[in-house]
Amino acid sequence: MTSVAPVPRLIEQFERGLDAPICLTWELTYACNLACVHCLSSSGKRDPRELSTDQCKAIIDELERMQVFYVNIGGGEPTVRPDFWELVDYATAHHVGVKFSTNGVRITAEVAERLAASDYVDVQISLDGATADVNDAVRGAGSFDMAIRALENLAAAGFTDAKISVVVTRHNVGQLDDFKALADQYGATLRITRLRPSGRGADVWDELHPTSEQQIELYNWLVAKGDRVLTGDSFFHLSGLGAPGALSGLNMCGAGRVVCLIDPIGDVYACPFAIHDRFLAGNILSDTVDGSGGFDNVWKNSALFTELRKPQSAGACGSCGHYDACRGGCMAAKFFTGLPLDGPDPECVEGYGASALAGERDKPRPRDDHSRGKPVMLTLERPPAKPCNESPV
Amino acid sequence: MRGLLTVPAHAVGDSSADDPVFEPSSSWRLHPQVAVRPEPFGALLYHFGTRKLSFLKNTTILAVIESLGDHADVASALAAAGVEADQQAPYLHALSVLVASNMLVPKESS
């Protein structure tokens, strides 16, 4: 087998960008019935500029043409959009599979039946504690019961393989086995992802992100028991903790290369955790090149994505032996903690992030805040000042 | 050499006794629920039923897979794509992995 031309590493191919994203997140609305303290999109109130049903369908048509095989739909709480099920049906009828994230508010027994009958819809129920006290401290009172009710309805309807989606925090990292047991109980798959300091998460990241000891605990758990656990490949910043390849998945930042976000008003960002002008590639409705616009144009021609697809500087990490493993970590985590993009991740396994965090830094604010007043758990709730400040449900 | 195919670890399902075993002497084709998206490096394969995503890492393996159904056996598909006899091993391995993950199915099962 000496005569076959060498195949470049896939990761190098991906860093140059693909003709269409592999993993596309689409947030359909900023409206949400909850007010989670770490919401990456600072959701709460609907934005009056949100895309219409027809505009959403036009995007789905385009995704079908680009062969984006599936979209991860989120929000906000996407199911509170009155046309949510219509859009799900439209997408699956046009060869765009749907995986949607929900807090479970609309997953009634009836909806669960309908979902069980569909071949191309995946459901991800968000849960940030394996117990109500740990979960509700972050997601709000009653949110644990709501998520469990949704899981029960799905299981009773025969919906197989729902996902339980957990953002790993300082308070739930010790519950990983409990989450796994909960998933097994409902015939679901556990998905755990990294807490990012994005959106309202910027305000709570310092107190919620796992400690360096917990990162090691998390890494060891993933290596030992992570076989059947999904991670969205989001823990690549930890891959330097062990042998290359011990952490399965694509260990790279896919922002603008294989990943991006479409937000509720048609703005395209490099990744779901980067809702900020600095990572805004363009708008699906207003940006055109030579008369043609849409998502395809932004994906292929935006200045930001073109820049991200060029070789990136390792910067301060260039001399670190782990650079090939973590590739400098998460761009959004660095940006929103006020660290330079060409330096270590705030959760760098060598501890370079911790020392950088201890220094002088200026944390950028998120672009837009759709929060309804203060997040629910940080202060007592006050009556809404305006009618639109009430829960959309 | 590096492999011709990358299958994410979580994408490999449980094997069962009913699963077909890769046989180079028979004819194979893409599962009807599998879509192929060509890319500069090769292609993405996506199975709408199992939600599995795989990456074909050069254009030759892509050509092999796209023409498999037109050939009576794997050897003739490989030959038609220009794979020399002494280069077949990585291709046969990639095809067996795709069979194990249900991306390829026996042609007669259509």
Image (tube, helix red, strand yellow):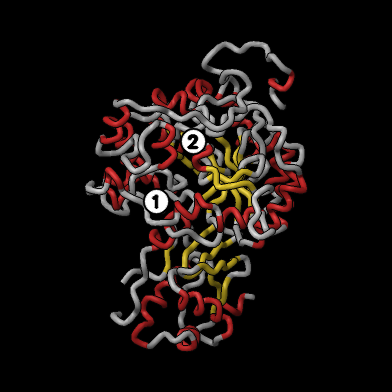
Q: What is the chain identity of the residue bearing mark 2?
A: A
Q: What's the residue at 30%, 34% (across, down)?
A: A353
Q: Which residue is mark 2?
A: A166
| Quadrant the C terminus of chain A occupies | top right
Residue at image point 57% right, 11% down: A380
The residue located at (72%, 40%) in the rendering is: A111
Evaluate whether label 1 is on the same chain as label 2.
yes
Whether A92 is drawn above or below A176: the answer is: below
Q: Amino acid at mark 1?
A: Met
Can residue A25 be spotted in the picture?
no
Which mark is drawn over residue A252? 1
Task: Give the secondary structure at mark 2.
Answer: strand
Q: Earlier in the sequence, mark 1 or mark 2?
A: 2
Question: x%, y% of residue B43?
Answer: 51, 68
Q: Is residue B75 left or right of residue A292?
A: left
In the figure, is residue B17 to the left or right of A29?
left
**Image height of A339 relative to A307, above or below:** above
